[in-house]
Each structure stands twice: as structure tokens, then as C-alpha cells.
């Protein structure tokens, strides 16, 4: 682990260790003399690594007249040539060198360097700095380029000069903000947030500034939306101060409150930036605020002709093609309208919004995902806008809640609870729906944010359900994730009814006549033609079914997860409902993934209410990680036995008292 001499004095004026192991080794050997074997045992490394680490430490300590020497029969001990110089070292605050150790960390560091560097970068320089090989970084660069390509950003290489990023300033800022948001979810103390990517202390400095400005003009953002906006402002501060302002952006008019809040924030940012801030910067800030605004107004007060049109189109499409009538649900209409108002702003100006729950949404709300996707995809044929999967996921939560509210058993609800949730309106509705479904005796009396909870003097409700840890206010608090585990659900201490629906679905819609084990290679389209052809011969579907299955697959893959795929048509096109089960021991290429268990769904309008229970059956297979056992079944009886075992285990996990 050689350190280039030209960098030593620059790097080690303040002692910074390339990794935590070196810092630990230095601390241990300051206090006692230890042999190689004991050091290797304590650090869980080989004696060869210990010797290598000692050499690196001695390089770092050169300027402080100290080194570790090996005394035969005793071990390594610290030898100090100049006590005064060494004492100056001990008086310094130690700071570990910011070095990425894993592939994920290196990719994040590489992205940050390319997005923030004004000059070309050379991989060999970064390899020396991070103590890895150049080939390692070259391997990481494939994912770096793929990430940047999502934002129309490219890296160009020139011999002897290195690599440099090219793309629009708006794309660079969006990419940086999305990257930092993802990093913050995984590690809020990451050096990329505190030092490398953003000005030191900027996130903390901006928090009261934004909160005061937004509160002054009655702009309400969910906590995650406020944090994302704070990240964007921190990125903007760095970019403007380094001479990279937005110079060419204009936006349609926004609400007076948003306009006033943006102007107030810009005025307060000027002394922070130390430079003039262009009108384009203020315009883009307005759009970012409007795109994340939630609540605060009644749906009737929203002037959103496009939003109204889209809400009516989605609900009308679901009613006509799937027989789920949600048109007369005022709560769903208001929630969708409020979300779509800001969604259209984001889509129009290509503002990305992360959806960390997307994978869970697909798996927990597969029916709502399908009906929403079908409606929005059909609507997109008549508009230039493209709605991303992240945006689709938020819409699905609203539709899923509406479906459960109207097409599930109604319940009585008694205990009064306070719900504290900081992840947006759609997630709040999803949690409410889960509570109504799983614990019907619960009444959600109030929904507030973490900040509002901390301002409460007391809690009137019987208990609190929260997505984050809370301070004690003399009422029981149950911390629960947006998609809670069974352990979290049991902590609520309520009885959960036995599930008898999924076994009934298995008996009613699965049979040996629609079961196949593939014994030869095939592709997805050939399989569709074969299965749909058989169903057509049986009179279960007509000639429109196969093209619709292909069309649905072309929109977004029907992979549910864990190697399980659910191909189906757009709409309820079957004359008689059944599920065609296909086991593919060798696997079938399914887009970017491989499917081993395939369920072709042919659902008719007469069984549309039971369709949700059919989907829930497949979700159970995914939760139980049953794909391998299902795939290896030798016949239909074996498949059915494995399926029933999964359902029984799932029932057992949800039927006990907490």
C-alpha cells in the first residue's frame, strides 16, 4: 500500500488513516507492545496484513519523528525520536481519510467526483488515493456510466487528460440530488454528505432557513420532501458558488404562496452563496417547491384542469376495463387530484422524485399496480408526457387503498390512534388501508408529521403508531415501517383473523388441466402463443387475449419477484377465469430477469372481485420464498402440496395474539 511521495505532505498534514483498521492498529500500539500473532487475532487479519499495515503507519508517522519497530520475542513497540514533534501529533484531532472500501461506496464516490469536478479525472490518480487497482475502478465505471446515462450525462475520455463529465447543469444537479438522497437513506453520516459533495455544515444551516420560509407562506411539505428540497438547495449553493449557475430556465406561473416562498428563500441564500443568483435559479426553485407541495388546500381549491382530466380518465378506465367502480369515492378523487397536481408539474419539467418503496409496492399491491399501469399507459398514448415507474408507484398506493376500501369486507373500528408519518400523503393512505384491513377495530383519529408531534404537549388518543422513533408523551408508541413486518404487526397486540380466502382461490382457479412443466427451451412469446391458443380452443378467451398479453408485457415486465412472473391481459378479457401454471426448471428469459414459475392469469369480469385474492396468493409465494420448491414440483399434486404448505405457514404467522 504505497503512498506517492508527492502526495504525502499534502495528505498527512493532519493524520488521516486510509481505513478504520489502521486507526485501530495505531491506537492499540500506542499503549502496549504486541506481537504480530496477537495483532492479527485482534484485527481479524493475517500476519502479512499486519506487517503491511505497520509499513503504512510508519510512512504516515515520518513527519512526527516516530515509528513502530519490531522487537524480537516481544512484538511491535512505538519508538519516538522527537517527543515534542510526536506530542503535536497527539494534540491534533484525528480525521480518517475518506476512502471508499466497497464497490457501492466506490461508485458513489466516483459519481460525486465526476459530478462536482471542474477538471478531468484520471483513474490511476483515484486508484492511488483510494488504495485500489485501476482495473477495480474500471469495473466500477460501467455502473457509473449507466447511472449518469439516466440523466443524459456522458463521460468523455481523452488520452493523457483523463475523463470529464458532459451534460446540462440542470441534469447534473438533479443527478447529484438524487444520489445524495439515496446515500442519506442508507447512511446519514456519510462523508459524501458532510464533506465531499456538499459544503461542510450546509444541510444543517439550510434546515431552519427553509422551514421558516415555507412556514411563513403556509407551504406544507412532507418531511422527506422537505429533506429532498434541502439537498437540492445545498447542491445549488455549491454549484452557484463554484461558477455553475442556471442561466436558461423559465416556468409557467405558480401559486402566489410558492412564488413568495421561493423569492424569500433566494433572498436568504444570497449571503450564503456570496454571488448574485439568477432569475432562472428562482424559477427552478419555484418548480421544485410546487412539485413537492402536499396538503394545505382542499381539492376543490386546486386549479388543475389537467389533473381533473387525468383522475377522471384513470377511474373511468378502471371501471370500464376491470369492473372496479371507484368513480364515486370522494376521498380517492381528492387524494389523486392532490397528488396528480404536483405530479404533472414534475413530469412537465422532468423533475425526478425518489420512491424507495417501489419494489414493495409492486409486490404488495400487484392488482392495483396492473389496473393503474393499464389506465395510465393508455392515457399516455394521447400525451407527450412520460410517467416514470416511481410516479406510477405513488398513484398505485392511492388506487390500492380505494380498491381495498370498496372491495374488501367492511369492519368496525374502535381504538383511537394517532398516526405519525413523514413519508408523504400516499404512504399515509397506504398505512391507513393496512390498519383497516388487518386491525378493523382501529380508528385513525389524527395524522400528523414528526415535527407536529414534537410540538404536541400531550396525546389524547389511546396510542400512537409511527414510522419513526418518537419521544415519550405518556402514551404507548408502536414504531412501524410503511410495509410492516409480521413482528411489528404482532406488537400491536391484536388478534388477526385466520386467512381462508387464499386456499379457496387455489382450489377454485388452479387445476391439472392448466398445469405444465417445460421440458425443452422456449422463449416468452412462444409460451404466450401456446398457452393462449389452448385457452382459446377451450373457449375461455377470444382472439383479442393473446395480443393483449403481449401488449401488457411490452409496457412493463410482469415479473413479480423471486423468479415468479404473472403475465396477463390489459383488462378482464377472459370469458371464464383460470390460472395457467407453468414450471420452467431451466428458466425463461423475462426481460432483464429469468422466470422459473409462470402464472398466466385469465380473469373474467364475473370474478373481478376475487381477483385481489388471486393476486394475494402469489404475493404469499414471494413472501415465503417458495419459488424453488414450486419450480421443483414433479406434478400438479406436488405443486399444490407446496402451495398449501406456504399458505398454512403464512396463516400461522398471522393468526396469533401479540
Image: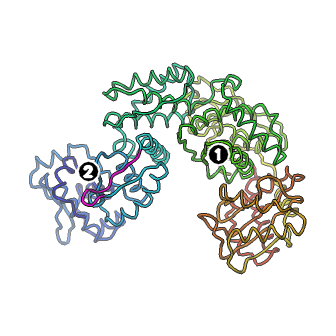
Give the image location of residue 609, x and y in percent.
Answer: 85, 49
Q: Quadrant of residue 42?
A: bottom left
Give the image location of residue 174, x and y in percent.
Answer: 46, 42
Residue pictured at 65% horizontal, 76% vertical: 586
**Residue 311 as seen in the image, left or right of residue 83:** right
Residue 490 seen in render: no
Residue pictured at 36% horizontal, 50% vertical: 165
Q: Residue furthest left?
A: 82
Report the Cα–Cα distance between label 1 and label 2.
45 Å
**Which class describes the residues within 10 Å of circle 1: few (<14), some (14-19), or many (20+)?**
some
Q: Is residue 160 magenta?
A: yes
Image height check: is 276 above or below 236? above
Q: Is residue 565 magenta?
A: no
Span of residues in magenta:
158-167
Residue pictured at 35% horizontal, 34% vertical: 240
Q: In the rendered image, which residue does mark 2 sit on?
A: 16
Amino acid at each position: 500500500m504505497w503512498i506517492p511521495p508527492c502526495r504525502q505532505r499534502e495528505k498527512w498534514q493532519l493524520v488521516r488513516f486510509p481505513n478504520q483498521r489502521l486507526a485501530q492498529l495505531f491506537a492499540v500500539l500506542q499503549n502496549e507492545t504486541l506481537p504480530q500473532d496477537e495483532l492479527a487475532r485482534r484485527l481479524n487479519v493475517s500476519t502479512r496484513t499486519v506487517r503491511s499495515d505497520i509499513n503504512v503507519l510508519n510512512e504516515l508517522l515520518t513527519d512526527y519523528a516516530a515509528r513502530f519497530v519490531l522487537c524480537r520475542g516481544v512484538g511491535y513497540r512505538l519508538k519516538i525520536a522527537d517527543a515534542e514533534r510526536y506530542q503535536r501529533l497527539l494534540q491534533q484531532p484525528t480525521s480518517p481519510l475518506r476512502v471508499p472500501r466497497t464497490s457501492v461506496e466506490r461508485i458513489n464516490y466516483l459519481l460525486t467526483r465526476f459530478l462536482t469536478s471542474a477538471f478531468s479525472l484520471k483513474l490511476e490518480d483515484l486508484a492511488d488515493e483510494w488504495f485500489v487497482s485501476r482495473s477495480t475502478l474500471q469495473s466500477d465505471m460501467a455502473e457509473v456510466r449507466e447511472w449518469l446515462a439516466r440523466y443524459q450525462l456522458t463521460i468523455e475520455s481523452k488520452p493523457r487528460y483523463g475523463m470529464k463529465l458532459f451534460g446540462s447543469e440542470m441534469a447534473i444537479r438533479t443527478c447529484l440530488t438524487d444520489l445524495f438522497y439515496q446515500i442519506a437513506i442508507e447512511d446519514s453520516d456519510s462523508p459524501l454528505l458532510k464533506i465531499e459533495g456538499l459544503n461542510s455544515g450546509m444541510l444543517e444551516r439550510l434546515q431552519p432557513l427553509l422551514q421558516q420560509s415555507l412556514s411563513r407562506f403556509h407551504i406544507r411539505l412532507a418531511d422527506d420532501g422537505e429533506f429532498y428540497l434541502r439537498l437540492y438547495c445545498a447542491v445549488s449553493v455549491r454549484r452557484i458558488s463554484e461558477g455553475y449557475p442556471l442561466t436558461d430556465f423559465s416556468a409557467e406561473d405558480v401559486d402566489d404562496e410558492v412564488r413568495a416562498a421561493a423569492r424569500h428563500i433566494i433572498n436568504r441564500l444570497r449571503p450564503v452563496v456570496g454571488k448574485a443568483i439568477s432569475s432562472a435559479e428562482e424559477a427552478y426553485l419555484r418548480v421544485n417547491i410546487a412539485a413537492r407541495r402536499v396538503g394545505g388546500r382542499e381539492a376543490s381549491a386546486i386549479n388543475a384542469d389537467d389533473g381533473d382530466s387525468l383522475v377522471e380518465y384513470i377511474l373511468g378506465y378502471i371501471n370500464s376495463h376491470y369492473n372496479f367502480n371507484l368513480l364515486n369515492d370522494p376521498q380517492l378523487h381528492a387524494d389523486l387530484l392532490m397528488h396528480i397536481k404536483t405530479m404533472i408539474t414534475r413530469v412537465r419539467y422532468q423533475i425526478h422524485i425518489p420512491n424507495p418503496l417501489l419494489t414493495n409496492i409492486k409486490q404488495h399491491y400487484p392488482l392495483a399496480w396492473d389496473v393503474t399501469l393499464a389506465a395510465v399507459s393508455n392515457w399516455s398514448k394521447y400525451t407527450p408526457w412520460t410517467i416514470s415507474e416511481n410516479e406510477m408507484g405513488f398513484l398505485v398506493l392511492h388506487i390500492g387503498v380505494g380498491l381495498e376500501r370498496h372491495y374488501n369486507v367492511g369492519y368496525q373500528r374502535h381504538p383511537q390512534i394517532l398516526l405519525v408519518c413523514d413519508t408523504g400523503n400516499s404512504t399515509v393512505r397506504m398505512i391507513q388501508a393496512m390498519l383497516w384491513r388487518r386491525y378493523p377495530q382501529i380508528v385513525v383519529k389524527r395524522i400528523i408529521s414528526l415535527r407536529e408531534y414534537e410540538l404536541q404537549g400531550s396525546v389524547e388518543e389511546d396510542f400512537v403508531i409511527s414510522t419513526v422513533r418518537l419521544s415519550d408523551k405518556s402514551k404507548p408508541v408502536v414504531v412501524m415501517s410503511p410495509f410492516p413486518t409480521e413482528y411489528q404487526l404482532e406488537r400491536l397486540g391484536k388478534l388477526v383473523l385466520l386467512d381462508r380466502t387464499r386456499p379457496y382461490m387455489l382450489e377454485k382457479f388452479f387445476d391439472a388441466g392448466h398445469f405444465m412443466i417445460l421440458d425443452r427451451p422456449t422463449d416468452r412469446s412462444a409460451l404466450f402463443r401456446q398457452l393462449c391458443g389452448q385457452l382459446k380452443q377451450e373457449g375461455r378467451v377470444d382472439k383479442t387475449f393473446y395480443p393483449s398479453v403481449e401488449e401488457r408485457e411490452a409496457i412493463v415486465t410482469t415479473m413479480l419477484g423471486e423468479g415468479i412472473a404473472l403475465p396477463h391481459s390489459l383488462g378482464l378479457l377472459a370469458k371464464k377465469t383460470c390460472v395457467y401454471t407453468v414450471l420452467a426448471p431451466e428458466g425463461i428469459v423475462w426481460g432483464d430477469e429469468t422466470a422459473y414459475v409462470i402464472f398466466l392469469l385469465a380473469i373474467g369480469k364475473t370474478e373481478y372481485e376475487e381477483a385481489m385474492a388471486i393476486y394475494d396468493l402469489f404475493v404469499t409465494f414471494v413472501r415465503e420464498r417458495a419459488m424453488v420448491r414450486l419450480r421443483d414440483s414433479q406434478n400438479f399434486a406436488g405443486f399444490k402440496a407446496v402451495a398449501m404448505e406456504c399458505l398454512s405457514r403464512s396463516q400461522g404467522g398471522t393468526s396469533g395474539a401479540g
